[in-house]
Image (cartoon, coloured by chain):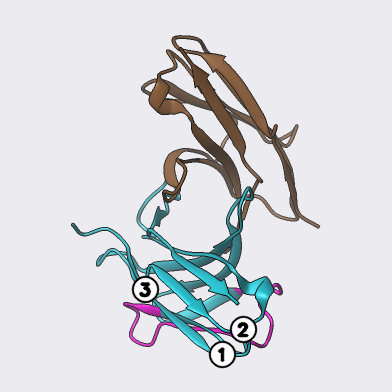
Amino acid sequence: DTGVSQDPRHKITKRGQNVTFRCDPISEHNRLYWYRQTLGQGPEFLTYFQNEAQLEKSRLLSDRFSAERPKGSFSTLEIQRTEQGDSAMYLCASSWTGGDTDTQYFGPGTRLTVL
Amino acid sequence: GQSLEQPSEVTAVEGAIVQINCTYQTSGFYGLSWYQQHDGGAPTFLSYNALDGLEETGRFSSFLSRSDSYGYLLLQELQMKDSASYFCAVRDLNKFYFGSGTKLNVKP
């Protein structure tokens, strides 16, 4: 299967701890997105990479959130000093600039629970 | 600010046609997309409109009117497997804004 993969699928942590999630996009895709989704809501945009460049970052992302895509392939999302309000599903998606339909392919997500 | 409005829930019977509306207000607009998400699953792409008009893909069609900041998703010949949440999403250059979703319940 060559779809978008995310690791881990589930993460339980205590408030104040740091967590890091990984996303592996579809190999030929140069665009990568991170979203956060809470129950009953749509995905909430966090950040966007084109290749290794982070071109957009939502102001919803506080200083505790950071994302990297060091070689334009996989990406990591780190949350420092987690808070209970960070509990959500974190989704990664990828796409490629050659498409004309803006299709984003989503991974299965990482469900974060902060105790 | 950015806002996308869509009905929270719609119920229809198998074999029927249902339309899910989306109105949006964003600072920029590059296109309107629709995604389907089953409970516990990831969103999957359904359709995209960058220009006014109707796009048809099998049983699904999507319409856009940029002057009205309005679009809709039309699902025909409803099947039980179409029971899911449907999200409209606006692309604003490098940002994407999703609506809060419409839960479609298909009944036999």
Q: Position of residue A54 (x, y in %)?
A: 51, 79
Instruction: State the residue position of label 2.
Output: A82
Q: Which mark is residue A17?
A: 1
Identify by letter the chain in cyan. Answer: A
Q: Sort mark 2 into few (<14), some (14-19) or many (20+) by Cα contacts within 10 Å.
A: many
Q: Is residue B83 above or below residue A18?
A: above
Q: Amino acid at mark 3?
A: Pro
Q: Position of residue A102 (x, y in %)?
A: 45, 50
Instruction: State the residue position of label 3.
Output: A8
Q: Position of residue B11 (x, y in %)?
A: 60, 20
Q: Amino acid at mark 1?
A: Gln
Position of B82 with respect to B24 (left or right) is left
- Label 3: element kind: loop
Judge by depth and name the residue closer to the eye, A57 or B76: B76
The reply to the same-chain question for discs 1 and 2 is yes
Q: Position of residue B101 (x, y in %)?
A: 62, 41
Q: Colour of chain B?
A: brown
Determine the image quadrant of residue A9. bottom left
